[in-house]
């Protein structure tokens, strides 16, 4: 694979109108491996050299490729140096390159960036659900080849994890709250509000661990509040798990509704409302009118308050001094003598 990329890069330098007709390049082995991600895009240039200048995306890649190859011939090139958009030591995109942007979109002419990918991915999931989300579809929406997305994210799962992190980064931690109960109340209410903005992502938030920095920060903050309030490590962990389960579970139930399907889930066995009576599900039919006017904000707040009150009561019990043991029969008279 690397040899094929090297051959194509050499072809660029010899055949491209942007080239000065230089001889075949002595490609640095380190660079060879890091050029793999543009293999799919450069194939088009190899097969149709006449479009190199006409296509601005291809022209940009050609100029970038020539720049990397020219630097690879410098005798002072070290493995840890940054060349073009790549750090030769790690193979990652350099911060400066990420700010400048990468491949240009055919549709908009805008450079491809991590932020644009996440913004577009979130819109696709909102519109099509998780089941309809794919790297190919994301690339089409961005106006680039799907392979270009892998330059920034190794997999679709990494994109979803990053989106979860983006949402959790919007949670209000209520640092100005005067007590731990108020802060926990506001923090978890804010989490629900953030999740309700993108309900199609909810199944992923429930199934995926919080493994990005913004998401882990939520866990860290909740545990910090609980431990500072006086809970021990085990009690704080139990409280965190219970509160997270309540927020995620309630929000999913709220989004789904009483008779609906979860966002983006395909349910071919779904019953129609008129089928409920045929199966004897009369209690559900009885509460449907009440469900139509149900006030979720008040219901969520009431449930959260019940949990927090229980935690407060548990904390008080754990901090009370142990009761003094009652004296034995006759012990008090003996002590008084």
Image: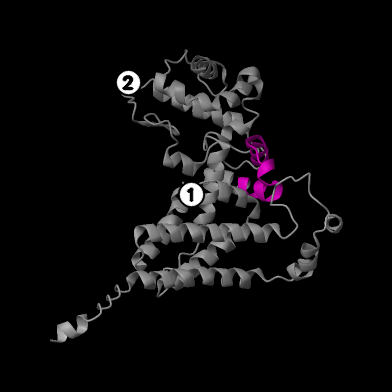
Q: Quadrant of residue 318?
A: bottom left
Among all residues in the image, which is located at the extreme front?
330
Mark 2 Cα-neighbour bin, 10 Å: few <14, some 14–19, many ≥20: few
Q: Which residues are magenta?
A: 121-142
The reply to whether the C-beta atoms of the residues labelled 2 and 1 are less than 8 Å apart is no
Q: Which residue is mark 1?
A: 210
Main SS type for the magenta part? Answer: helix
Image: 177 above or below 57 = below
Instruction: Examine the rendered structure and indicate whether residue 100 appears above or below residue 44.
Output: below
274 left or right of 132 in image: right
Residue 293 location, quadrant: bottom right
Viewer-closest of 113 and 161? 161
Relative to 294, does residue 206 appear above or below in the rendering? above
Where does label 2 land, which residue?
75
In this view, 268 is above or below 23: below
Residue drawn at x 65%, y 59% is 253
Residue 233: x %, y % from top left: 35, 58
């Amino acid at each position: 694979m690397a040899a094929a990329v090297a051959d194509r890069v050499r072809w660029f330098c010899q055949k491209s109108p942007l080239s000065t007709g230089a001889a075949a390049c002595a490609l640095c082995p380190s660079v060879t491996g890091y050029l793999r991600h543009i293999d799919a895009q450069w194939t088009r240039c190899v097969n149709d050299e006449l479009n190199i200048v006409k296509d601005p995306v291809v022209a940009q890649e050609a100029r970038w490729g020539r720049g990397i190859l020219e630097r690879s011939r410098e005798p002072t090139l070290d493995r840890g140096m940054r060349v073009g958009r790549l750090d030769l030591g790690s193979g990652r995109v350099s911060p400066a390159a990420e700010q400048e942007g990468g491949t240009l979109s055919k549709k908009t002419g805008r450079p491809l960036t991590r932020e644009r990918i996440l913004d577009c991915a979130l819109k696709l999931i909102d519109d099509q659900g998780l089941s309809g989300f794919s790297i190919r579809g994301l690339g089409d929406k961005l106006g680039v080849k799907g392979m270009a997305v892998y330059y920034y994210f190794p997999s679709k799962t990494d994109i979803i994890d990053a989106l979860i992190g983006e949402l959790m980064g919007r949670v209000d931690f209520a640092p100005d709250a005067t007590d731990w109960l108020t802060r926990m109340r506001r923090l978890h209410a804010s989490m629900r509000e953030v999740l309700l903005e993108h309900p199609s992502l909810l199944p992923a938030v429930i199934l995926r661990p919080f493994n990005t920095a913004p998401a882990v920060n939520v866990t860290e903050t909740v545990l910090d509040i609980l431990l500072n309030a006086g809970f021990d490590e085990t009690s704080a962990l139990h409280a965190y798990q219970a509160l997270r389960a309540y927020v995620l579970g309630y929000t999913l139930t709220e989004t789904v509704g009483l008779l609906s399907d979860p966002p983006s889930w395909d349910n071919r066995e779904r019953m129609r409302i008129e089928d409920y009576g045929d199966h004897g599900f009369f209690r559900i039919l009885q509460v449907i009118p009440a469900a139509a006017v149900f006030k979720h904000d008040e219901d969520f707040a009431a449930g959260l308050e019940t949990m927090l009150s229980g935690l407060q009561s548990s904390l008080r019990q754990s901090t009370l001094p142990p009761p003094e043991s009652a004296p034995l029969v006759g012990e008090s008279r003996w002590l008084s003598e």
